[in-house]
Image (cartoon, rainbow, N blue to C red):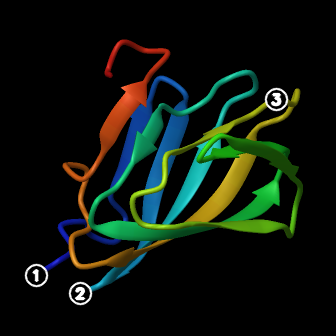
Amino acid sequence: MANRFSVGESDVRPWGRWEVLDVTDHSCIKRIRVEPGQRLSLQRHRHRREFWLVLCGRARVERDGEVRELGPGEHVVIPQGSWHRVANPGPDPLEFVEVQTGEVLDEDDIERREDDYGRA
């Protein structure tokens, strides 16, 4: 089985939290919350690609050195192997849906280059 997540699984991280909404053998859908002023590590995945849809708040997305801001209803595709991160530059929580697709979907498929919380 390619997916080690289960529906309802969640985790609190230094930047916010995530919760698994749905899973199949080759996809995982998470709702991710990033607190104001926080950001995820600069990372890449060797076995999956991601699609992010902003639900509320503002997202500052870095993808392979390019930075853009997204608001509610806007989305971005993160190709497999692409260096990426998301930050919340606004005063309100950022929430987005992340759809992961690929052959291996688990937390072990994260390679961090930079991290504000000492995990790189």
Q: Which residue is mark 1?
A: 1
Q: State the CA–CA distance, disc 1 to disc 3.
A: 37 Å
Q: Which mark is residue 118?
A: none
**Residue sticking out furthest to the front:** 65
Dot 2: within a 10 Å radius of its alpha carbon, few (fewer than 14), some, or many (20 or more) residues? some
Q: Is residue 7 left or right of residue 60?
A: left
Q: Which residue is mark 3?
A: 89
Between discs 1 and 2, the one toward the N terminus: 1
Looking at the image, is 112 positioned above or below residue 23? Answer: above
- Looking at the picture, how far across and down is residue 37, in whole percent? 74, 21
Circles 1 and 2: CB atoms closer than 8 Å: yes
Residue at image position (36%, 12%) is 118
Q: Nearer the viewer, residue 56 or 63?
A: 63
Circles 3 and 2: CB atoms closer than 8 Å: no
Q: Which residue is mark 2?
A: 25
Q: State the CA–CA distance, disc 3 to disc 2.
A: 34 Å
Q: State the CA–CA distance, disc 1 to disc 2.
A: 6 Å
